[in-house]
Image: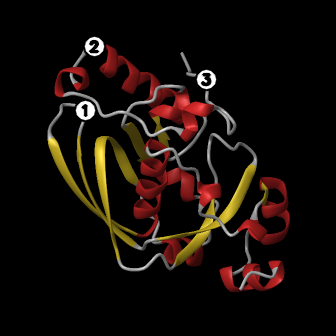
C-alpha cells in the first residue's frame, strides 16, 4: 500500500510538526507508518520522505539514497555533489546544526512539488542529533549530498520547502531541466538564467 503524497498548497506542509514521545516512537502505529513511508519512498522514487508529506504533522522523516539513483549522473557530477549511497534510516525529533556557510548550490526536486526543480543553496556539512525508530539517540555528521538530503527533510518538519530557499530564477520544470541544463555546470546555469 502506498501513501498519498501531499502537494504544495496543502497546509500540513507549512506547519511546524510536533515532536513524538518515546512511547509514540515505539508504538505499533508509528512502526507501521515508517514501513508504509518506506514503501511509498521506494515507489516514488525519492531519497527522503517527511511525515508532513503524507499528511502527518509529526517530527519523523526517512532517508535512503540507493546506488541506482545516481546512475544517470556522470562521474564528474557524482564527485561534484559528493553523492554516495545512503542506507535506509529514520530520523525523529531532529536538531540540525549547520557547519559553515550555505555555499553549495545544486538542483533539488521534491515529491511534494512534482515535476519541478530549482537551484538551492545548502550547507556543505551538518551535524544532526535525533532519535531513530527504536527511540535510540543518534548523532549524524554528514557532508555533500547526504547533508543536502538531511537539510531538505528537516526543513519539511519545520514547515519549509526548497522553494523558500531556491534561486527564484532557477525554478523550472523537470522537462526543461533535462533538456537544457542537466549537463551544464552550476556556473553556466547561473549565467544562463541571470542569477548573480
- Other-residue count near label 2 (Cα within 10 Å), few / some / many at <14 / 14–19 / ≥20: few
Query: Mark 2 or mark 1, which is nearer the start of the sequence?
Result: 2
- Name the side, left or right, on which 14 lies relative to 28: right
Label 1 with label 2: CB-CB less than 8 Å: no
Q: Position of residue 2 (x, y in %)?
A: 56, 21
Give the spatial CA distance, label 1 vs label 3.
Answer: 22 Å
> Contact (CB < 8 A) between labels 3 and 2?
no
- Residue 164 appears at what percent x and percent y? 61, 58
Q: From where the camera sits, is residue 66 visible? A: no
Give left or right: position of 179 versus 18. Answer: right
Locate the C terminus and report the quarter of the image it occupies: bottom right
Task: Identify the residue at image location x=50%, y=76%.
Answer: 79
Residue at x 49%, y 27% (from the top left corner):
39
Instruction: Give the alpha-carbon distance from disc 1 to disc 2, as whole Å.
Output: 11 Å
Q: Quadrant of residue 89?
A: top left
Q: Is residue 79 placed above or below 57 in the rendered structure?
A: below
Please give the residue where the numbered disc 3 appears in the rendered image.
Answer: 4
Q: Is residue 173 positioned above or below 60 on the image?
A: below
- Graded by Cα atoms within 10 Å as few (under 14), some (14 to 19) or many (20 or more), the crowding at tag 1 reads some
Question: Does 25 appear above or below 117?
Answer: above
Residue 133 tag number: 1
Which of the numbered marks, if any, corresponds to residue 28?
A: 2
Residue found at x 49% / y 39%: 49
Q: Describe the element under mark 2 as helix, strand or loop.
A: helix
Q: Earlier in the sequence, mark 3 or mark 2?
A: 3
Amino acid at each position: 500500500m502506498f501513501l498519498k503524497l501531499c502537494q504544495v498548497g496543502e497546509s500540513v506542509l507549512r506547519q511546524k510538526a510536533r515532536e513524538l514521545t518515546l512511547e509514540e516512537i515505539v508504538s505499533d502505529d508509528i512502526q507501521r507508518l515508517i514501513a508504509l513511508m518506506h514503501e511509498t519512498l521506494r515507489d516514488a522514487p525519492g531519497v527522503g520522505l517527511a511525515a508532513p508529506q503524507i499528511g502527518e504533522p509529526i517530527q519523523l522523516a526517512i532517508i535512503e539514497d540507493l546506488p541506482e539513483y545516481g546512475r544517470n549522473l556522470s562521474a564528474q557530477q557524482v564527485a561534484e555533489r559528493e553523492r554516495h549511497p545512503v542506507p535506509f534510516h529514520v530520523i525523529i525529533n531532529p536538531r540540525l546544526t549547520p557547519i559553515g556557510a550555505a555555499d553549495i548550490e545544486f538542483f533539488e526536486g521534491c515529491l511534494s512539488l512534482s515535476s519541478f526543480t530549482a537551484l538551492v543553496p545548502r550547507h556543505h556539512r551538518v551535524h544532526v542529533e535525533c532519535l531513530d525508530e527504536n527511540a535510540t539517540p543518534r548523532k549524524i555528521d554528514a557532508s555533500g549530498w547526504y547533508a543536502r538530503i538531511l537539510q531538505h527533510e528537516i526543513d519539511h518538519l519545520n514547515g519549509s520547502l526548497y522553494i523558500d530557499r531556491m534561486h527564484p530564477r532557477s525554478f523550472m520544470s523537470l522537462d526543461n531541466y533535462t533538456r537544457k541544463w542537466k549537463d551544464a555546470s552550476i556556473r553556466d546555469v547561473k549565467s544562463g538564467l541571470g542569477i548573480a
